[in-house]
Image (cartoon, rainbow, N blue to C red):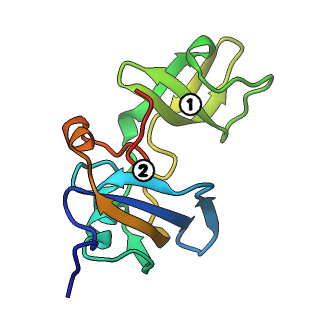
């Protein structure tokens, strides 16, 4: 049985999470609650599907194969990028380092394959592509979205406020 505060379309959800890889090693942890508009494709589709119907206070463990998370790695995702286009600044770039780069589609995370003096060879696949991921989620709050949030297609924070 779902109540009016169950996660469903047009609800704003705030949750904390711990992200683990296939071996159970922690890869990421939320520092503050993640807030999203359910049904607006603001988070991974597989995670959104798994949270549907849950309530405030629920603890949910969701394991997603690569196809429902960040996808499988693409062989055509290697690119040579001038260092000046990086949003991540460093004195020394090294292979394996995750950096943010400015692209025509906005900010993207990439992994350095080879570091040169002026350019980096980057793997533009998401750093978690090809990985089975487990999210340990704690649902903090569920509320109705405001008309403004619905028109914008994203949540404006826990209380519905956002500075745009």
Single out the mark in the foreground, 1 or 2.
Answer: 2
User: Does 55 appear above or below 128?
Assistant: below
The part of the image, by quadrant, that contains residue 161 is top left
The quadrant the C terminus occupies is top left
The part of the image, by quadrant, that contains residue 118 is top right
Binning the other alpha carbons within 10 Å of mark 2 as few (below 14), some (14 to 19) or many (20 upward) gives: few
Q: Secondary structure under badge 2?
A: loop
Q: Which residue is mark 2?
A: 159
Q: Secondary structure under badge 1?
A: strand
How many angstroms separate mark 1 from mark 2 (CA)?
Answer: 30 Å
- Residue at horizontal 44 percent and vertical 41 percent from the top: 125
Binning the other alpha carbons within 10 Å of mark 1 as few (below 14), some (14 to 19) or many (20 upward) gives: some
* Residue 57 makes an appearance in the image: yes
Q: Nearer the viewer, residue 18 or 128?
A: 18
Q: Which residue is mark 1?
A: 100
Q: Which mark is residue 72?
A: none
- Residue at horizontal 46 percent and vertical 28 percent from the top: 107
- Residue at horizontal 38 percent and vertical 46 percent from the top: 160
């Amino acid at each position: 049985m779902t109540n009016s505060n169950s996660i469903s379309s047009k609800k704003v959800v705030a949750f904390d999470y711990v992200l683990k890889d296939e071996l159970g090693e922690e890869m990421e942890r939320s520092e503050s609650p993640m807030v999203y508009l359910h049904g607006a494709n603001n988070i991974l589709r597989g995670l959104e599907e798994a949270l549907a119907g849950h309530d405030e206070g629920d603890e949910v463990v969701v394991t997603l194969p690569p196809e429902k998370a960040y996808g499988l790695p693409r062989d055509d995702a290697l690119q040579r990028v001038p260092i000046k286009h990086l949003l991540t600044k460093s004195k020394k770039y090294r292979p394996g380092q995750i950096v943010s780069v400015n692209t025509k589609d906005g900010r993207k995370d990439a992994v350095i394959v080879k570091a040169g003096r002026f350019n980096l060879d980057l793997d533009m696949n998401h750093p978690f592509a090809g990985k089975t991921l487990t999210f340990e989620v704690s649902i903090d709050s569920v509320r109705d979205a405001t008309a403004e949030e619905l028109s914008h297609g994203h949540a404006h924070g826990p209380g519905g406020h956002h500075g745009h």
